[in-house]
Amino acid sequence: MFYNSINNFRAIAIMFIVFGHSFDVSGVVLDSYWEVFFRNLLSGGTILFVFISGYLFEVVFLKKFTFSKFYFSRASKLLWPYLLLSIIPICLYIYVSNPISDGYFLPKSEGAMSQFMIPFLKYEVTGRFMTAYWYIPFALLLFLLSPLVVHVLKKNLKFKVSLILILSCVSIFIHRPVDNMNHFHSVVFFFPVYLTGALVSQYRESFLKTFQGNLFWLLFLLSISFTLIQTYFGDVGSYHKPFFEFKGIDYMFLQKILLSFFFFLLLEKYSKSNLFFENLAGTSFAVFFIHPYLIFIFRNLKLPTPETVLFQWVYFIALSFIFILISMLLALFTKRILNEKSKYIIGYWPDLVKI
């Protein structure tokens, strides 16, 4: 049967990611404490995504792990659509006057190598050509650590928990890299999240017994508490800074780790088969690849946005769901037309987890 809980969690995670990316094009003005609070609550969904990725690594690959099989499987799902979908925005970036972002990798001298080849390679390596695409080169780097993850998961529980706590302490002080450009920095930041997801899967039954009844709501309250603290200090969204620069605690990391635990436990208890969530989970990577294109198109349409606070938030929610629905429908349509080839073009791998 389908593993409904984790599939529904995948659907929720991609919704968080799209919601987080939709703020900047929705026209929402953060004029009050509670507006910033909800922005912080809906931002940082990448942590949910990485938690699920670690969880699925333990479920799907650990028992019969071979590095070459695992890495080829993951890389083939990400690399081909990434390379294909990067061509248009990178060419626009190079050949058209700065249409997408804010001047990264502009040529510094004359000649084809400096003007075209070097910028093209820099965009490909960093993913700095479209919203969210930095995640793909980061993930390919993270997956190289899979033998280390296997080694850690073979250790005793005390060692694994201690390691995750130590690495998490590092993460909350280093924050995410500036503009998500340094993927080695990102790997250090997200690695304890990946390990945590794998550990929760490995000790799934014990974890569920520990949080029997409604105890898991405590995790939600703790997550909300860190959101309130982050908002109180005036911090908006995910934290970004150079690796060795000190700028305090990353409350978003703590908030989203706790929210990951909460969603896992909530969905284990209440999850049922749901057609919308099933389709969204199955198309989650395709939605991930497609929605930045929709945001880019919408941003360049420069449509007027509501002026009143209430309509701004209604507009934001509606726009986010429109991006999700259009991305999902485009994925399903492409799959119907191109069948198996769709996975190489838009990353549509309808691999719902089964047990």
Image (spheres, rainbow, N blue to C red):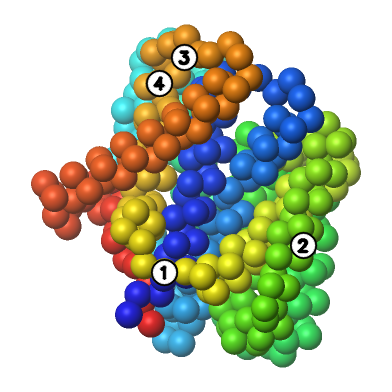
Crowding at label 2, few (<14), some or many (≥20) Cα neighbours within 10 Å?
A: many
Horizontal and vertical percent for residue 71? 42, 67
* N-term-proximal mark, 1 vs 3: 3
The CA distance from mark 3 to mark 4 is 17 Å
Q: 14 and 31: which one is in front?
A: 31
- Element marked by disc 4: helix
- Amino acid type indicated by mark 4: Phe
Say how many tags the image has: 4
* Secondary structure under the numbered disc 3 in the rendered image: loop
Q: Which residue, given by chain and number where applicable, does mark 3 sit on?
A: 98
Q: Which residue is mark 4?
A: 298
Do the numbered discs 3 and 2 sit on residues whose CB atoms are within 8 Å? no
Nearer the camera: disc 1 or disc 4: 1
- The answer to which of marks 3 and 2 sits earlier in the sequence is 3
Gap between marks 1 and 3 measured at Cα: 46 Å
Q: Which residue is mark 2?
A: 168
Question: Residue 41 vs residue 317: left or right?
Answer: right
Question: Type of residue at label 1?
Answer: Lys
Residue with the mark numbered 1? 272
Q: Locate residue 7 relative to residue 218 in the image: left or right.
A: left
Q: Nearer the viewer, mark 1 or mark 2?
A: 1
Residue 234 visible from this viewpoint: yes
N-terminal-most mark, 4 or 2: 2
